[in-house]
């Protein structure tokens, strides 16, 4: 049986298991250095003891980055 290499969460860098829920974010359509669309994957499920998922944490980081850029 062929198993694909495990996908890793771009936020916490832990593997995303097949049974996990996850979110895919397209980074860019294509670039000279790549062969097509590129994606990040994030856990959509909460870890035990966490209040928000990796995906939500990532979104919050984006908001902070955007706010900082606007302030600069
Ligand atoms: Zn994660």
Image (cartoon, helix red, strand yellow):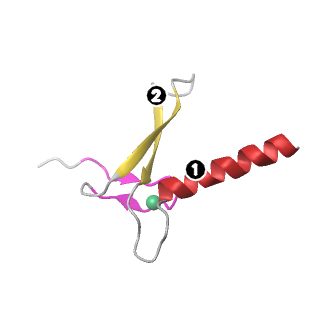
Seen at 50% across and 62% down, the residue is: 12
Main SS, magenta region, reads: loop
* Residue that extends furthest to the right in the rendered view of this protein: 72
Which quarter shows the C terminus? top right
Give the residue pinned by disc 1.
59
User: Eyeballing the image, is 19 above or below 36?
Assistant: below
* Residue that extends furthest to the bottom in the rendered view of this protein: 49
Q: Quadrant of residue 20?
A: bottom left
The range drawn in magenta is 4-17
Give the residue pinned by disc 2.
37
Which SS class for mark 2?
loop
Seen at 46% across and 61% down, the residue is: 53
Which residue is nearer to you in this view: 52 or 13? 52
Which residue is nearer to you in this view: 51 or 12? 51
Which SS class for mark 1?
helix
Residue 69: give x, y in percent of width and height.
80, 42
């Amino acid at each position: 049986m062929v198993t694909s290499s495990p996908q890793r969460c771009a936020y916490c860098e832990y593997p995303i298991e097949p049974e996990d829920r996850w979110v895919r974010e397209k980074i860019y359509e294509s670039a000279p250095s790549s062969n097509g669309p590129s994606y990040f994957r994030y856990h959509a499920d909460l870890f035990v003891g966490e209040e928000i998922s990796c995906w939500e944490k990532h979104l919050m980081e984006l908001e902070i980055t955007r706010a900082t850029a606007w302030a600069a």
